[in-house]
Amino acid sequence: MSGRRRTLKSIHLVSTLWFILCVGYILVGALRQAGVRWWVIFSLSGHSALLIFLLLSLYLFAMFRGISSSQKVQIEHPLTSTHYYTVFYVITPLLGGLAGCLGMVGASTIGQFLLGIALGTLCATFLVWVIVDPVTGLLEMLLPPASRKHRAQRLARAKALREKGQRNRERLLAEVLANEKSVRQRWQKLLNPKAEKLAGLLTTNKIDFKQAELEAVDIGVNAWQIGGLSCMRELRDMAMAIARRRNRNKAVVDYIDVWWDGIGSWRNTSLG
């Protein structure tokens, strides 16, 4: 199977180069017939490169649709999933060039002969990729009962898997939130005495400020050992809330942020 895919890729490369060559020939020929000089055509090389890039992108997209096994379920696409159809799909530009070559036998000039080959390539590619292949794929899915049934079952399975994945994500999120809530409730019970003491230290006088700082550091180290930075933040918020309540919602200076600077990963935000 890998050797077959390598062969298809090689044919794909040849078809791509041939398709681009034919489109380029038609564009240049049309410009020349309109009286555009060669130096003007070459000056449009940037725009031409953009056009070729767009055509190549469309070509590769069509090729991907044609040979991607992930998009061709055999029971849903009994014709277009076969190797013979895939080969036909890939070599369509070359077949179009051959048809144009046969159709232009007896042409009076080389230019007409080459133009017929290029137009045959372009027309055949457009016919197969834009009209025949989409219509064939649609008929494959709509007409046979087995194809419709299989497609409905496949879509139902895919929908069920998506819904199951969504339920699992919601369940995991609920578990995380519940676990976080449980941890915070346990912290609040454990930290409430410390928060009361820390709130009292915030209103200490200047004489005992150094001693208050030492006690606050001990409380911060203990909170870090209990639950890291999250626990320290929870304790700080509890202490500030208690201090404001005691101070009748008046402004309270947040010394905790300074006292705890350097404990674990705590950093003084006023210095950041």
Image (cartoon, rainbow, N blue to C red):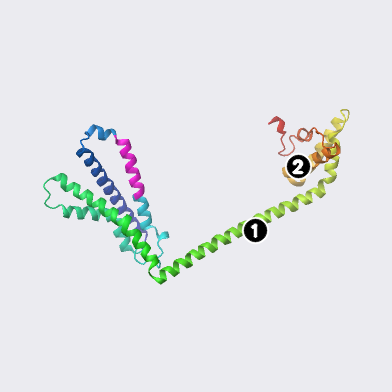
Q: Is residue 56 above or below residue 7?
A: above
Left or right of residue 189: residue 77 = left
- Asked where in the image residue 211 lies, by quadrant, the reply is top right
Badge 1 crowding class, 10 Å Cα cut-off, few under 14, some 14 to 19, many 20 or more, is few
Q: Which mark is residue 232?
A: 2
- Residue at screen point 22% across, 49% down: 119
Residue 145: percent from the left, percent from the top? Answer: 41, 71
Work out how far the residue at label 2 is from the one at label 1, CA to CA, in angstroms. 28 Å
Mark 2 falls on what kind of element? helix
- Is 57 magenta? The answer is yes
- Asked where in the image residue 264 lies, by quadrant, the reply is top right
Residue sitting farthest toward the top = 207
- Residue at screen point 31% across, 53% down: 12
Main secondary structure type of the part rendered in magenta:
helix
Q: Which mark is residue 247?
A: none
- Residue at screen point 38% across, 54% down: 64
Left or right of residue 30: residue 49 = right
Front-most of residues 130 and 71: 130
